[in-house]
Amino acid sequence: MKFIVSSSYLLKQLQVLGSVINNNHTMPILENFLFELNQSQLTVSASDLETKMSATLEIESESEGKFAVQAKLLLDMLKTFPEQPLTFTVENAAVEISSNSGKYALSAVSGEDFPDSEQLQDPSSVTIPAEILATAITKTIFATGNDELRLVMMGVLFEFSPEGLTFVATDAHKLVKYERTDVKSSEEAAFVMPKKPLNILKNILQTSDSEVKIEYNKSNATFSFDNVVLTCRLIDGTYPKYNQVIPKENPNKLIIDRNLFLTSVKRVSIFSSRSTHQIRLKIAGAELNISAEDVEYSNKADERMTCDYQGDDILIGFNSKFLLEMLNTLTSDEIQLEMSLPNRAGILTPVDGLDEGEKVMMLVMPVMINS
């Protein structure tokens, strides 16, 4: 087998695929890239058994066949090359790579040992613009949990219907619901996507302006766009009935500049307790008071700012880490914080900057304030 490919073109594709590989895997073959040559097309794949991603490259070749080569070694080598054509020659369990300045030999293993990707039986499908899917992942993935005893909360819930698409993530302390009514599905479906493939997708979708075709069944989902195909196993389990925890009556409404609020919370939170990260919001009339105290180290901070507020005077505590994550993820100029009681969740929504048919709702549970 023999083929010629641009060094920078190959490196760019392999760096994306390399994010799939788990170096602590018990199957040595999974530390390799699988190369499948079909004349002028080269398909390179990486897998960790749960997720498999492939990219198809245009190359110069008249050969056919497949082999696997150690991913880290190949990536480390490609990073050192300036842009130039590289000639790969595969023969007798070895790969010889010829550059403008030298020759390099890597051991190859049989491509037959590489695990096949799951073939979806009778899949349903929906097509989403890459930009919308990237935004949906970005707006939700930070709210996923890390508790392996509640595995289903370690992923993002995808809900498709003829009315639109909904993406939900929660860790029981915070919850994000992202909706699009401008993209619809012909049928109703719901499945939970794990974090790892979503992070990979988020990073590569941000530079794509194509459509993403999502095919799915009860156990797997495939995302196809540009020259990339990603297949992953879904998280098995029933997602919590998230709508039941969203307070319906929230008479106290605060509207404030997002950046001013963000920088104030960030500053005040430095002085909060290292265990609770609690900050307090005291709102009365048109004044918002943000404070924090770490009794153990005698640190405290207190800031005042004007705001647009309608409702009863309220004193409520939040975990500043959760609040900062939400404020950093939102992109609007102004945000609205809706509240009912100090022991009920606060609802954060953007006031502006949304596309037609786009809705974002972020819920944050309060932290009990000690008198």
Image (cartoon, rainbow, N blue to C red):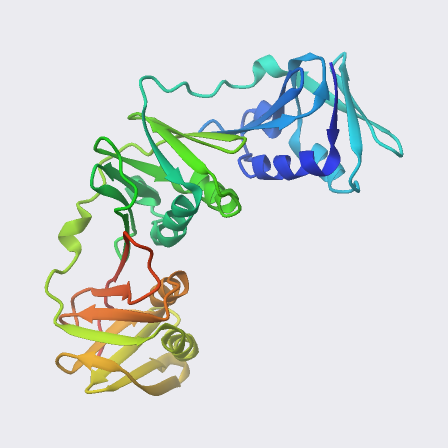
Q: Say which residue appears at 57% left-offset and 15% top-offset.
A: 113
Q: Is residue 23 visible?
A: no
Q: Position of residue 259 (x, y in %)?
A: 40, 74
Up-down: is 128 above or below 258? above
For the N terminus, the image quarter is: top right
Residue 19, picture quadrant: top right
Q: Nearer the viewer, residue 129 or 148?
A: 129
Q: Position of residue 67 (x, y in %)?
A: 65, 17
Q: Say which residue appears at 31% left-offset and 82% top-offset.
A: 290
Question: From the viewer's perspective, is 206 left or right of 341?
Answer: right
Q: Is residue 350 visible?
A: yes
Question: From the viewer's perspective, is 17 left or right of 290?
Answer: right
Q: Position of residue 254 (x, y in %)?
A: 23, 75
Question: From the viewer's perspective, is 102 left or right of 114?
Answer: right
Count of labels shown? 0
Q: Nearer the viewer, residue 347 or 64?
A: 64
For the C terminus, the image quarter is: bottom left
Q: Say which residue appears at 35% left-offset and 86% top-offset.
A: 303
Up-down: is 50 above or below 337? above
Q: Position of residue 46 (x, y in %)?
A: 56, 29
Q: Looking at the image, which residue sits at the far right?
A: 101
Residue 334, picture quadrant: bottom left
Up-down: is 298 above or below 102? below
